[in-house]
Image (cartoon, rainbow, N blue to C red):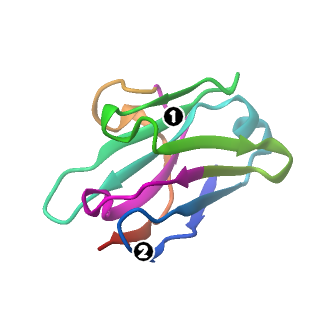
Amino acid sequence: HVQLVESGGGSVQAGGSLRLSCVASGSSKNFDRYCMGWFRQSQGEEREGVAAIDSAEVATYADAVKGRLTISKDTSKNTLYLQMNSLEPEDTAIYYCAADCRPWYGNDWGAKYWGQGTQVTVS
């Protein structure tokens, strides 16, 4: 079993930056091997994939965030990151960390593990 805890959300003005973190516990081996990713859900909208990174650290992104958001991981800390630059009001959402997934496959990429979410508000 894997537990995921997000942090780093907050309120920023348009054009600002945030860095989200997701700490994984329960299985560091799985963390090393999993595809992991970030999703977001705006009020009244369905959850959508934002960024993914596989076990080889190959990153992919939704078109809406390319060039502005960067996913990375630090396996020594069991931590996934999402660096968010040039934020826009449309980026306002709850951001979720997900693990053990197939990036861009079906609904929620078939992810088995989810964090509780962290709120990002851009005004």
Residue depicted at x 51% and y 63%? 17
Question: Is 96 a magenta residue?
Answer: yes
Q: Is residue 48 left or right of residue 30?
A: left
Residue 99, relative to residue 109: is it above or below?
Answer: below
**SS at badge 2:** strand
- Give the percent coordinates (x, y) of residue 103: 45, 27
Name the kind of residue labelled 1 in the image: Ala
Q: Nearer the viewer, mark 2 or mark 1?
A: 2
Please tell me which residue lies in front, 120 or 107. Answer: 120
Q: Quadrant of residue 109?
A: top left
The residue labelled by disc 2 is: 12
Q: Is residue 35 left or right of residue 78?
A: left
- Give the percent coordinates (x, y) of residue 61: 43, 32
Range of residues picked out in magenta = 82-102
Quadrant of image for the C terminus: bottom left
- Give the percent coordinates (x, y) of residue 23: 68, 58
**SS at badge 1:** strand
Kindly report the distance in space between the C-alpha atoms of the residues bearing marks 2 and 1: 24 Å
Name the kind of residue labelled 2 in the image: Val
Please tell me which residue lies in front, 84 or 71. Answer: 84
Q: Quadrant of residue 89?
A: bottom left
> Seen from this angle, which residue lies furthest right?
76
Please tell me which residue lies in front, 25 or 117. Answer: 117
Q: Is residue 5 left or right of residue 115?
A: right
> Seen from this angle, which residue lies furthest bottom?
11
The residue labelled by disc 1 is: 52
